Image (spheres, rainbow, N blue to C red):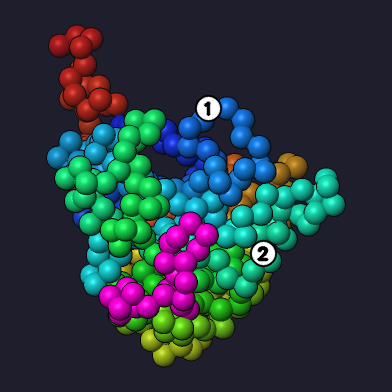
Amino acid sequence: DLHDFETKQIVVNPLFRSDHGGAFVTPNTEYVMEATQYAAPYTGSGFVPLEKFNDEYRGGLTYWKFNMEKGKIEPDNSFTFELPPYSQDLSDAGKGPTYGWGFTNSFCSERYVGGIERGRPPFEAGCSSKDTDFMHVTNWKKAGELVKAGKIGKKVNGMTLISMKEAVANDLLYLIPEPKSPHGVDVVPTGDKIVVSGKLDSHAWVYDWKKIQTAMKNKKFEGKDPYGIPIIALKDALDKSVAVGLGPLHTQFDSKKCVAYTSIYVDSMITKWDYCEGKVLDQLPIHYNVGHLMAMEGDSVTPDGKYLVALNKLAIDRFNPVGPLHPQNHQLIDISGDKMQLLYDMPVPLGEPHYVVAIKADKLKPAIRYKSGWNSRLDKRSQWKTR
């Protein structure tokens, strides 16, 4: 709660066994998106052998309903899309022309389960054997309306679950090929394009929403996946791909039109590029192995620009050693000019930095002090108040 920076609620997903990297909200905070990482049986009723992985293990995408008046998540009014066991990853919500839709990566559409002890390839190699994975496109707005009307979904472990069959029948779920093993899906500020990138492809792929909508409207699909979900062909969705460096991940946006910044993990640098013209504008070495990055309000419809923070996984030689562990490293970068300029290093202990956002301080109005007898966790007067 930004009123006092206190945790006011924690919810546990009754269907998932894991998730990964960030919570993503729809533009008006109608819902909070949470995707699985590794597939698991929904029932949680005991051991299910990996030989049944394709049939009984499932991924998923939960849209947690958020009550703005109460400032609370409402599990009873939330719902989950059943998804194939493709190891879903990061998500983003559409805005402007893409409002009402959500976009979610996957990184193991091979449905590989390992087996190095039996002479099979390592898990990472098996999950990288295909040239592409799938971006999941979900119509959360229509799904919410149908769930509220009682037309789709059933309760499983207390959560409303929309089956893949129901989602397909109601035009709620589509798949689009994306660069293999992606770790970033980012809707541009104008909402008409989606940028996807992954460590195993040196390009950032830019998808065009108009082309995607046309394919949906005309039901122009290249086929269906093993679970019956329609697949929109890459040529019917892709606008362009831009060579940005080895190991691109997360993209943030500038206040300048069409300007984006992508973290480059393997090359340890930030690439500034134009997603309208499809050209690289500048590259800045960072120290080292950047994962995510954060531009000021860089994932909103009105990015503020000026500064960017690289959330680096390694510091190596940037700081004096103070023990057996090295800190991670945040680097502040000036992006106000044509060329990026590194300003400052800040060591961060205990944990690899992941998805973060920035907001202007003058937009917040935090409490200066609590009222006497106030329960900060429940945000109301305590029953044990003394006066």
Q: How many marks?
A: 2
User: In which image quadrant can residue 245 be found?
Assistant: bottom right
Whether residue 12 is visible, yes or no, is: no
Q: Identify the residue at image location x=63%, y=49%.
A: 327
Q: Identify the residue at image location x=31%, y=38%.
A: 154
- Residue 167 higher or lower than 298, as above or below: above
Q: Secondary structure at mark 1?
A: loop
Position of residue 11 measured from the top left corner of the image (x, y, whole percent): 37, 33
Which class describes the residues within 10 Å of circle 2: few (<14), some (14-19), or many (20+)?
A: some
Give the residues in magenta. 213-234
Residue 230 belongs to magenta span: yes
Whether residue 201 is visible, yes or no, is: yes
Provide the residue designation for mark 1: 45
Position of residue 339 measured from the top left corner of the image (x, y, whole percent): 48, 83
Position of residue 280 measured from the top left corner of the image (x, y, whole percent): 51, 86
Q: Amino acid at mark 1?
A: Ser
- Residue 386 higher or lower than 88, as above or below: above
Q: Amino acid at mark 2?
A: Ser
Distance, label 2 to label 1, CA atoms, is: 31 Å
User: In which image quadrant can residue 360 be found?
Assistant: bottom left
Q: Tell whether 144 sits left or right of 231.
A: left
The earlier-in-sequence mark between 2 and 1 is 1
The residue closer to the viewer here, 1 or 349, is: 1
- Residue 381 higher or lower than 113, as above or below: above
Q: Identify the residue at image location x=50%, y=83%.
A: 241
